[in-house]
Amino acid sequence: MYKELIDRLASGEPLTSDEYLGLIGSRDEIRDYAAEKARAVRQKYYGNKIFIRGLIEISNHCKNNCFYCGIRASNSLAQRYRLAPDEIVACADSGYSLGFRTFVLQGGEDAYYTDDVLTDVITRIKSSHPDCAVTLSLGERSRESYAALKAAGADRYLLRHETCSAEHYGRLHPDNMSFENRVRCLKELKELGYQTGAGFMVGSPYQTQRNLADEFVFLRELDPEMVGIGPFIPHKDTPFASFPAGSAELTVFLLSLIRLTLPRVLLPATTALGTADPTGREKGILAGANVLMPNLSPAGVRKKYMLYDNKICTGDEAAACINCLAQRVKKTGCEIVTARGDYNGI
Ligand code: SAM
Ligand code: FES
C-alpha cells in the first residue's frame, strides 16, 4: 500500500497530508523504495551531478531571537564578527579559483548590511565573475530591499520558513516574529524572480508528525526552486538547549519525499545532516539530494558561526573540504560538478 503511494507520488500525483502522514509513520518499510525512486527522478532532471555552493558566513550579528539558534541576539556568549565587503569579495575570489560558480552569502539579520553595502558587494562579485550565481540568505527584508538586491545581480535567495504551522512557528520564535511575514517574504522573492529556497528543521521542539506531513502540502503549493532541510540540533546557550536533536534517519527519508514531490528542486544534503550523522550527507545524496554547500568562510570566523553544538567542517580549509566531499560523493555513484547549477524548471 505504501509502495503504491510512492508510485503515485513519483508519477506526479499530489498526495494528501493524511497520505504523507502514513508514509512518515511507515518509513521503516518504505525508505529504500522511496530513495530508489527519488534517485531515479534526480537522475532524470540532473543526471548524477551534485552541485557545490560556496557558503560565505558574512556575519553572526543578528537582531532576532529565534529560540533554537546559537547566534540569536540574546546569546551574550557568542563571539560576534562581521566580514567587511572586501573580505567577502576576497572569499568569493578564492572560491572562484577553487572552482565554485555559486556563492551563498549567509548571515544573521545584521543592520550593518544595508542595501547600499550589499549592492556594492554583489556588483563587485558579479562583475569579476559574470559566470557565477550569487545566492543570499540574510533573513527577512522589505520588498524594496529584495528588489534592489535582485537588480544588483543576486540570483537566488534562501529563507527557510522553519515550519508551515503558524502555531508551531509561534513556539519557535518570539512574538515579534511571525509566520505571516516569513511567507510574505517568500512570496515576494518568488514574484521578484529569485530562485527561492524554503525549508524547515526536522525534529524541532514541539514538532508533530502532522506538522511534517503538512510541510509537503505547503511546499507543493509554494513550489520553491530550492528546499533546505536539516535536523534540529540543540545549542547549549539557547532556550532549547535541553531538547533532543532531530533524527538524521527521518531527515533522509523526508529528502526522498521532497525529491518526489518537487522533482526538479535543488535539494542540499546539509551540514546539520552531516553533523547529526557522520555519513548523513552521503545518505542524503543517496536519498535524492543534489547540492552540497561547503564552507568558504575565512578560517578565523568559522567557529563563531555556531548555529548549533558540534557543527562540522569548522576547522578545515575550503580546498580540503572539497577534496573530502568529492571522495564522499564518489562513493554514492555521483560526481561533484562546478556548474552554476540553476533550477532545471523548464
Ligand atoms: N538569518 C537568515 C535566516 O533566518 O534565514 C540565515 C541564517 S539562519 C542561522 C540559517 C538557518 O539555520 C535557519 O533557517 C535554521 O533553519 C538553521 N538553524 C538555526 N539554528 C539551528 C539549530 N539549532 N539546528 C539546526 N538548524 C538550525
Ligand atoms: Fe538570527 Fe539565528 S536568530 S540567524
Image (spheres, rainbow, N blue to C red):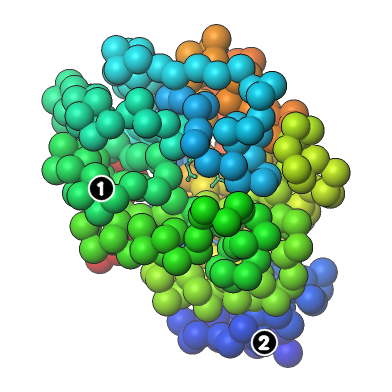
Give the image quarter of residue 202: bottom right
Q: Determine which of the numbered discs, if any, sits on residue 255 in the image.
A: none
For mark 1, does the 10 Å Cα neighbourhood hold few (<14), some (14 to 19), or many (20 or more) residues? many
| Viewer-closest of 222 and 113 | 113
Task: Please name which of the two marks, 1 or 2, marks the residue nearer to the observer.
Answer: 1
The three-letter amino acid code for the residue at tag 2 is Asp
Q: Secondary structure at mark 2?
A: helix
Looking at the image, which residue is at 78% across and 53% down?
A: 247
Give the image quarter of residue 310: top right
The three-letter amino acid code for the residue at tag 1 is Tyr
For mark 2, does the 10 Å Cα neighbourhood hold few (<14), some (14 to 19), or many (20 or more) residues? few
Q: Secondary structure at mark 1?
A: helix
Q: In the image, ligand 1 is in what quadrant? A: top right
Cβ of disc 1 within 8 Å of ligand 1?
Answer: no
Disc 2: which residue: 18
- Compared to residue 314, the image places residue 261 above or below, namely below
Looking at the image, which residue is at 39% across and 35% down?
A: 104
Residue 209 x/y as whole percent? 74, 72
Q: CA distance from mark 1 to mark 2?
A: 36 Å
Residue 77 x/y as whole percent? 69, 21
| Viewer-closest of 255 and 37 | 255
Left or right of residue 304, residue 346 in this image: left
- Quarter of the picture containing the C terminus is bottom left
Residue 128 x/y as whole percent? 17, 21
Looking at the image, which residue is at 60% across and 62% down?
A: 169
Residue 309 x/y as whole percent? 74, 31
Disc 1: which residue: 146
- Compared to residue 22, the image places residue 143 above or below, namely above
- Label located before the other in sequence (1 or 2): 2
Q: Farthest residue in the top direction?
A: 300
- Quarter of the picture containing the N terminus is bottom right
Looking at the image, which residue is at 46% across and 81% down?
A: 12
